[in-house]
Amino acid sequence: MSAAPVTGTGQNRPDMVLLGVVGILLAIGLLMVASASIALGDRQHGNAFYFFERQILAAMMGLAAAWCMAKIPTRVWQRLGPWLAGAAILLLVMVLVPGLGRTANGSTRWLNIAGINIMQVSEPVRLMLLIYVADYAVRRNQEIRSSFLGFFKPLVIVGGAAGLLLAQPDFGSAVLLIGISFTVLFLAGARLRDVSLTLGPVVLAFALLAKFSPYRMKRLTGFWDPWADPYGDGFQLTQSLIAIGSGEWTGLGLGGSVQKLFYLPEAHTDFIFAVIAEEFGLIGSLAMILLYVLLIWRAFVIARTAAGREQFFHAYVAFGLGVWLALQAAINLGVNMGVLPTKGLTLPLVSYGRSSLLVTLAALGLLLRIDLENRGIASATRRRVNGRVAQ
């Protein structure tokens, strides 16, 4: 007897919750970039939709990148792990070369070739090094579990990348990269004592960098008591808090924000959540947070499913992506609400930032590929079982 095909299981369909949440967040992001930047675009460029047009172009490129990532087998990325690490370091070095890096607001973070801004390099570097660390965690799993050296080797690459990020300077991206890498290695079985022995000095180094860096100390003092200098160091945070408080329960309505009218700096980028809170209130803010919780939950579910099928590279990448989104969203929300000092990290899928949006969508395309491979394995296993039963 021949095995009957499995029907009605939905095993070969992508994760519709994941796709739905990403679609909603992307739509909200485009809408809010248009709302938050309309006055700034008109004033600086004579085009009210200047930033919106560039964001929607980035979204289209990001969706194309996500489609490509979803079509490429995950094993290809695993094989490229060491090469991606080398490319990541090269990008970080290139952006610090005079003539190749573009400086804005005191930071050299953008790669500029022939007068054209190509990308903010910290974004693709994060994804490249996540793939490298996940690949290393599979290849050298026994070393990670049994020796400090096995655990420490990939951190030399990650630490070098973090140092180059700090040279830009990009403190927030360095913290995010270190956090993702440590989490993936710990998940891969690194001993708690090895993690503690390494993480302690890293935290101390970051604290000393903040203490002995004048502009970082200004950010910290402005964060601790923004109302002590509301027109100086605390200006951005006080304006953000005013925006969030003005929204009350249901907000002022779409387009009704007052703080975005040249009061709140970076209203369409790092502080877009404050505009969302002002226009949609506490209810809208909680809905946004719930969407991020759903997105992160799906990433962790996909990671757990992959681990259950002993696809450990898939699991480490999916878990790392979940941690990435969770940390970045939490830091951005914390900055907007005055819980954390300013870090310069965008709100994933929502803030204006073409490099951030493109790379985030590409990363989510990789997550979708992992989910599809999980479902393909499950479907194949189910067909084999049904075939044996039919015989």
Image: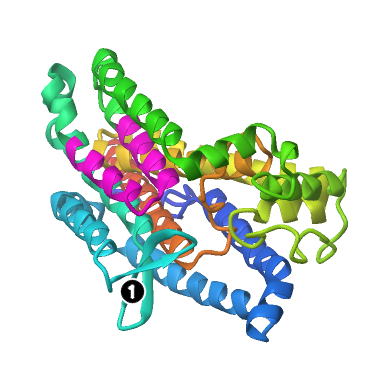
- Of residue 306 and residue 263, the one placed in the foreground of this image is 263
Image-based side of 42 in relation to 325, left or right: right
Disc 1 residue type (three-letter)? Asn
- Name the element at disc 1: strand
Quadrant for the C terminus in the image = top left
| Residue 33 x, y percent position in the rendering | 65, 66
Way the structure is coloured: rainbow
Magenta portion: prevailing SS class: helix
| Residue 330 x, y percent position in the rendering | 56, 39
Which residue is pictured at 56% across the width and 41% down the height? 219
Image-based side of 78 in relation to 58, left or right: left
Q: Does 176 appear above or below 144? A: below
The residue identified by callout 1 is 112
Which residue is pictured at 38% across the width and 61% down the height? 109
Q: Is residue 143 magenta?
A: no
Q: Give the range drawn in magenta.
A: 156-184
Q: To which quarter of the image does residue 80 belong?
A: bottom left
Which residue is pictured at 72% across the width and 48% down the height? 240
Residue sticking out furthest to the bottom: 46
Residue sticking out furthest to the top: 193
Image-based side of 60 in relation to 195, left or right: right
Q: Does 96 appear above or below 147? A: below
Determine if residue 36 is in view. Answer: yes
Determine if residue 386 is in view. Answer: no
| Residue 378 x, y percent position in the rendering | 34, 42
